[in-house]
Amino acid sequence: MREQWRGLDATALEDAARKAAGTAAAQCLLVRAGRSAPADAPAWVRGCQVASTGGPPRIGLLLPRSGKFAGLADVQLAAATAAVRVLAGPAGSNLQVAWEDAGSSPAEAKQAAATLLASGASVLVGPVGPGNVEAAAEVAAASGGRARLVVPGEGAGQVVGVAPTLEARAAALAQAVGRANRTTAVILAPDNAYGKRAVAAFEKSLPKMGVKSLKSIYYPPNTTSFSKVLEPVRSSLKSAAVLIPDQLGRVELVVRQMVRDGVVIDRPKQPGVPVLSTAEGCSPEAIGAGHEVLEGVLVAPVGWETPEAAGFTEAYTAMEGSGPPDQAWLVYRAVAQAWAGAEAAPPPAAAVLRVESGRFVATESAVSLNPAERPQGR
């Protein structure tokens, strides 16, 4: 019977299913046409999905549209749409994509992943959030190797990631401190799991780059005024390198306070205090008009524009009216990785860029982190 399905399109399969409505055979035909198998369907029905024949994979987008991660939804949906347009250009209709709302909880992510696999997806892109990634990875693992998972973030274990680790980014910034010949460094970090992980990475990397005096200060994650935060280190700032692992918007608040305190920020034509950051949430708008105070700041972002992806920049900008932010780049690279086959790859490199005239400009060559140095369970 299955041999007779070869070459039939979804419409023909659905017509055949209607003639056998109410039977397991009809369910099988609908699954073959790309529908999800009903929860009460016999186990063999799931085996009716289209098997890969070495052509382009069927990509399942597993990204949040609801819950606490819904704030990423618009950016991620636009990025996924632009990515598909760019990648499908040379491939035409061969690129197959399905979408499910991953929600914001492990249970929701698990259900969405199962739905996509039932529809024939061979590669899942997403979700976000450690618990949700683990849930989706569990579903992918249960497929017996039939499906792979690519996340728009850091990878772990069998999960392919497209973002450099926080440790790799800290190492890249530490190298920049070494090139600046600074032996004193001040780390200002949010008092949360992210901030503590970043500080631990800097405390490991900076001494290797010649830093002999290192001071770490934590502040509440919702801090908006940094006068009191800087008070304990104000006298030493002018001879130090200042590292701020945080959202770029909060980095700007720190820099503004430093300028008010008379600190001269290091810039291409203005020697001064180097300011470096992981710059979460960076985007062209975040360093554009009105944000000139960030001029000269060195950043090691999680996602950024590269020359070979100019087509994505154009497609995203045409849709949204502004260039892609870091999270959009992660989605694009995850979809591109899935399109390429989602094979296991070494940890992505980290790069240090400089804010210059409202743009991110490359500085030194990228650095990568040896897989053996990556923290477990991250």
Image (cartoon, rainbow, N blue to C red):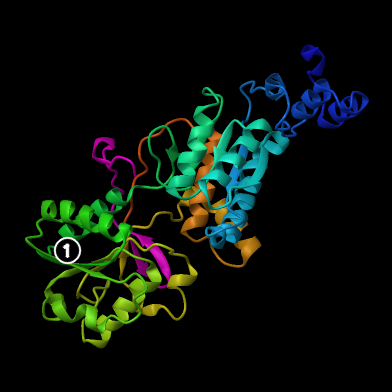
- Quarter of the C terminus within the rendering: top left
- Looking at this rendering, what residue extends furthest in the right direction? 19
Q: Residue at x 44, y 44 (%)?
A: 162
Magenta-colored span? 353-378
Is residue 341 visible in the rendered structure shown here?
no
Quarter of the figure with residue 278: bottom left
Q: Left of 273 or right of it: where is 251?
A: right
Q: Left of 32 or right of it: where is 275?
A: left
Q: Residue at x 67, y 36 (%)?
A: 95
Name the residue carrying label 1.
Answer: 180
SS at badge 1: loop
Give the percent coordinates (x, y) of residue 184. 11, 66
Residue 359 in the magenta stretch? The answer is: yes
Q: Residue at x 77, y 14 (%)?
A: 2
Give the percent coordinates (x, y) of residue 354. 33, 64
Q: Residue at x 32, y 51 (%)?
A: 166
Q: Amino acid at mark 1?
A: Ala
Is residue 22 visible in the rendered structure shown here?
yes
Nearer to us in this view, 246 or 44: 44
- Quarter of the N terminus within the rendering: top right
Nearer to us in this view, 37 or 213: 37
